[in-house]
Amino acid sequence: MRSFLAFLKKEAVELYRSGRAILLLILFVALGIMNPAVAKLTPWMLQMFADSMAESGMTVTAVEVNALTSWTQFFKNIPIALIVVIFMYAGTLAQEASSGRLIPLLTKGLSRRKVVLAKLTVVLFIWTVGYFMTYFITYLYNAYFWDNSIATGLLPAVIHWWLFGLFAICVMLLFSALAKSYVGVLLSTGATVLVSYLLGMIPKLKCAVPSSLMNSASLLTGIQDSLDYAAAIWITVVLSLFSIASAVIVFDKRQL
């Protein structure tokens, strides 16, 4: 346990010294502010372009914005944060394996599985803290300007999207343990998400694949509830656990 905590501390210090922590903090805070700001400014922006649009034969009608508009913006913007996190950590295990930095630590008793779990802990901590920071900033601004109660299925939608982010991170770590290059990890992770998305286009699989958890619109408006996505939740959890278990096994056998 001491070796795990020591390596975890090293990862945390590296996160701070590399400037990643500050960059991610700025990103998550900016997204939290941007969601209600874009919603609030939408009528003004449409009014600004009303004349030029009228010249093209397009008529601008009055637009009513509310908390639902802001939450829709939240779910449009949060993929940016997930992509940035994945880009930052896509080669984390591959780099550790190729650089030789782990060899001194492994000779001192640090197990490879603890390396994988420490990496997972750091990335999930970043994703969870940053994600809910963006959520709470957006929630507070929405409460100030409008009424959050209009988004009836807000909490399930937020948890669903966080769970999808967890799945993407676990898959990324698996491919980081498998692949030898940063680009290979990115392509493999992206391909996995794409396959999930394509499978979700099949009616019978629509609510049973991880990518379906990104569908927040039907939850926000109350058309569907969380129980409709029970299969997707269970499958996502199982696939996430399988990915991490596989990453531990693969990295344990990988030649350094």
Image (cartoon, rainbow, N blue to C red):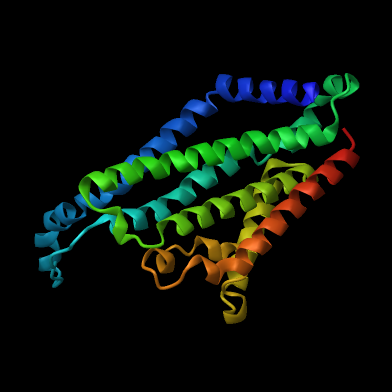
Q: Is residue 160 left or right of residue 89?
A: left
Residue visible at 88% across and 19% down in the picture: 108
Tell me, yes or no, if residue 216 can be seen here: yes
Looking at the image, residue 37 lies above or below residue 234: above
Residue visible at 15% across and 64% down in the picture: 53
Question: How many numbered marks have been drawn onto this rendered protein structure?
Answer: 0
The C terminus, quarter of image: top right
Looking at the image, residue 45 lies above or below residue 17: below
Return the residue nearer the eye: 159 or 249.
Answer: 159
**Could you say where residue 135 lies in the image, as x and y percent from the top left?**
41, 45
Residue visible at 67% across and 21% down in the picture: 9
Residue visible at 65% across and 41% down in the picture: 90
Q: Is residue 198 left or right of residue 177?
A: left
**Could you say where residue 160 lies in the image, as x and y percent from the top left?**
53, 57
**Could you say where residue 254 lies in the image, as x and y percent from the top left?**
88, 40
Looking at the image, residue 200 lies above or below residue 71: below
Q: Is residue 27 left or right of residue 213?
A: left
**Farthest bottom residue?**
203
Q: Is residue 196 left or right of residue 102?
A: left
Give the image quarter of residue 249: top right
Tell me, yes or no, if residue 101 can be seen here: no
The N terminus, quarter of image: top right
**Could you say where residue 48 lies in the image, as x and y percent from the top left?**
12, 54
